[in-house]
Image (cartoon, helix red, strand yellow):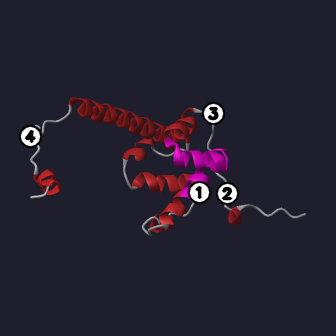
Amino acid sequence: MTPLIALMLQQDSTTTTANPLALAMGAGMTVVWLAIMVLVIAALWKIFVKAGEPGWAAIIPIYNFIVMIKIAGKPLWWIVLMLIPFVNFVVGILILAAMARNFGKGTGFAIGMMFLPFIFYPILAWGDATYQPQAPAAYRPQVAV
């Protein structure tokens, strides 16, 4: 038998107990993740209340997105677009942009809401932003010049 085959067939005699350091790191990361999730849910709750919607809607999985569509001022049939792969990504970006605009924030803030929600949702929730829905162009009164 060649030395390479003998090396591959060699049994490992170490025990298979869990590494305490890995367990501690996993537990620590779980606590951090849970804290971030609680922060984002609380911020979303406050955002819904600012927009005149029930805060408890933030914890209901599909209903919270329906409320976000309503806050963004988009038609409710957009929920169907969320079922289409890749289209849902674009629709989500558009909804976040419209939601940020309705709170008086710009496109950069919407990008922050997308990539760093644990920072930008609390800013929107507990900051001085007020909900002022923008009427769609079709519903704006036409001003004669």
Who's the residue at 20% across and 33% down the image? 19
- The disc at residue 73 is 1
Q: Which residue is mark 4?
A: 13
Q: Which region shows up in magenta?
A: 93-117
The answer to whether the residue labelled 1 contacts the one labelled 2, judged by CB atoms less than 8 Å apart, is: yes
Q: Amino acid at mark 4?
A: Ser
Question: Closer to the camera: disc 3 or disc 4?
Answer: 4
Q: Which residue is mark 3?
A: 128
CA separation in Å, label 4 and label 2: 70 Å
CA separation in Å, label 3 and label 4: 62 Å
Q: Which residue is mark 2?
A: 135
- The disc at residue 50 is none
Is 127 situated left or right of 61 in this image? Answer: right
Q: Amino acid at mark 3?
A: Asp
* 4 or 2: tag closer to the N-terminus: 4
CA separation in Å, label 3 and label 2: 21 Å
Residue 82, position as x, y percentages in the image:
46, 64
Secondary structure of the residue carrying tag 2 is: loop
Q: Is residue 106 magenta?
A: yes
Q: Is residue 77 visible?
A: no
Q: Amino acid at mark 1?
A: Gly
Secondary structure of the residue carrying tag 1 is: loop
Question: Which secondary structure class fits the magenta region best?
Answer: helix
Question: Closer to the camera: disc 4 or disc 2?
Answer: 4
Residue 93, position as x, y percentages in the image:
56, 57
Q: Is residue 96 magenta?
A: yes
